[in-house]
Image: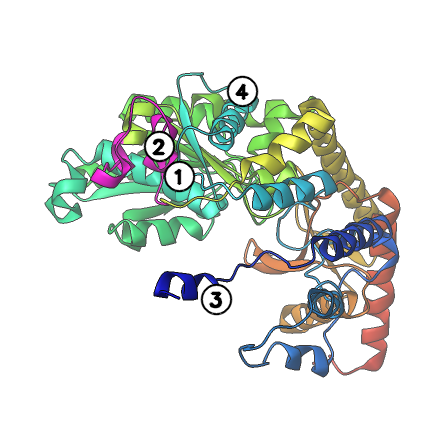
Amino acid sequence: MDIAQETVGTEETLDPADWAAVQALSHQVIDDAVDYLSDIRDRPAWREMPAEVREAFAAPLPRSPVPLAAVYDEVSRTVMSYPMGNIHPRFWAWYMGSSNFTGALGDFLAAIQGSNLGGGNHAAGLMDSQVVNWCKQMLGFPASASGTLVSGGSMANMIGLTVARNAKAGIDVREHGVAAIEKPLRFYGSDQIHSCHRKAMEALGLGNRALRRISTDADLRIDIPALRAAIVEDREAGFKPACVIGNAGTVNTGAIDDLRALAKLAHEEGLWFHVDGCIGALIAIAPDNAHRVAGIEWADSVALDPHKWLHAPFEVGCALVRDAVAHRRTFAVTPEYLESTPRGLASGEWLHDYGLQTSRGFRALKVWMALKEHGVDKFGRLIDQNIAQASYLAGLIEAEPLMELATSPTINIVCFRYQPGVTGEALKVLNTEIMLRLQEQGIAVLSDTTVHGEHWLRVAIANHRTRREDLDLLVGEAVRLGREIAAEGSLRK
């Protein structure tokens, strides 16, 4: 026997030896998944992991095989039993969508098909481009604009701001680097801007100081006269104003900058106009509230998040850029091993030319399937529903003598606190304890933040499973816990 024949006998694969057994287990997984979602309301919104579950994640690297059924059993007992909770109808912390079963099937099928969305002539690549085109239509962007699907809002903003930097630098930044820029660039955003913009400035080599935070008005929207004054001041000081970042919904309160006024200002001043729409860009599809983001269609670039108000399973964000040439010029590289061919697999578009990733997951399918199943109009109605629920919650809080509202909600974010007549640190400690007990008792998951320099609890309703009865429960339980904590006396100062 020669060496080649000996090698054949030792070749292995990751495919199962018994496809029928795997098929049976897969049916069980699907059945369990349906049960998992259908009774989500009856489970705690969140619960702490016991010590033995935590210890399971400290197990050493497995060397020997374990039956797939045993692997799934361990996943069921650990990961599936102690989730973050964002699919629960009473999860309102931070800001994230609540997923959907069809999207989960899309993720499964995308993984089965296994395509790399770096580009090429295959169906998944065309679907990726189609979903980007649908996002353009939702926001009123021209068909000639470009875009790319990315991991989420932070990366979508990074894409838009990178194109802005390169377009306004006055030199070939890719060839010569930021050190060759003659005048230091200035980017502008409100003092409510998301932290990802600071990270972007740092990663782009401009530094945190290149991002000038502009004061906001009583409604926490960027102060337009203050922005104009800052631009004049920077020019006189030898800086080059390059980009203004508008908020289509701030992360703290959901405040929406005057996008039309910002677009006009940017045009007059020769600035790139970028909109961070990760909170509220998709309000553009909501029939009752679309007017709130009027002007977003005039932006040079927009960041949005289908894994928020399109409820796609994590993760999928989208960056749209009006100038497709500037977009591609910012990222495209063509090494000899990725050159196009007139026919065959390499004859398709190279999608990696529009972002930082050469290898890209098939994010489009989960979005595509859910939009096809439900239609975009239903997603728009769900956005209106969440905004109406926030208004309803604000009314409950105003009607409760022991509750205090930070500000009237603009869209779907409500900031409030329990107020029994204490102030300062004691008030913060009390409300933080209410928030933690709501979580620990599995009632609801909130976050907290600072508004106008004071501490507040924060409810972000971006959940298609939330009902008004859930908000009634929240207010009642928060008051109950507030009284309970106050009666304990441990938080008195």
Crowding at label 1, few (<14), some or many (≥20) Cα neighbours within 10 Å? some
The answer to which of 38 and 27 lies nearer the viewer is: 27
Task: Identify the residue at image location x=59%, y=56%.
Answer: 15
Which marked residue is nearer to the observer: mark 2 or mark 3?
Answer: 3
Q: Is residue 335 visible?
A: no
Q: Is residue 46 left or right of residue 187?
A: right
Q: Which mark is residue 137?
A: 4
Which badge, 2 or 1, is on the more N-terminal residue?
1
Which marked residue is nearer to the observer: mark 3 or mark 4?
Answer: 3
Which badge, 3 or 1, is on the more N-terminal residue?
3
Amino acid at pointer 1: Gly
Task: Identify the residue at image location x=42%, y=42%.
Answer: 157
Q: Position of residue 112 (x, y in %)?
A: 59, 45
Q: Disc 1 marks which residue?
A: 118
Which badge, 2 or 3, is on the more N-terminal residue?
3
Q: Which mark is residue 10?
A: 3
Q: Which mark is residue 350?
A: 2
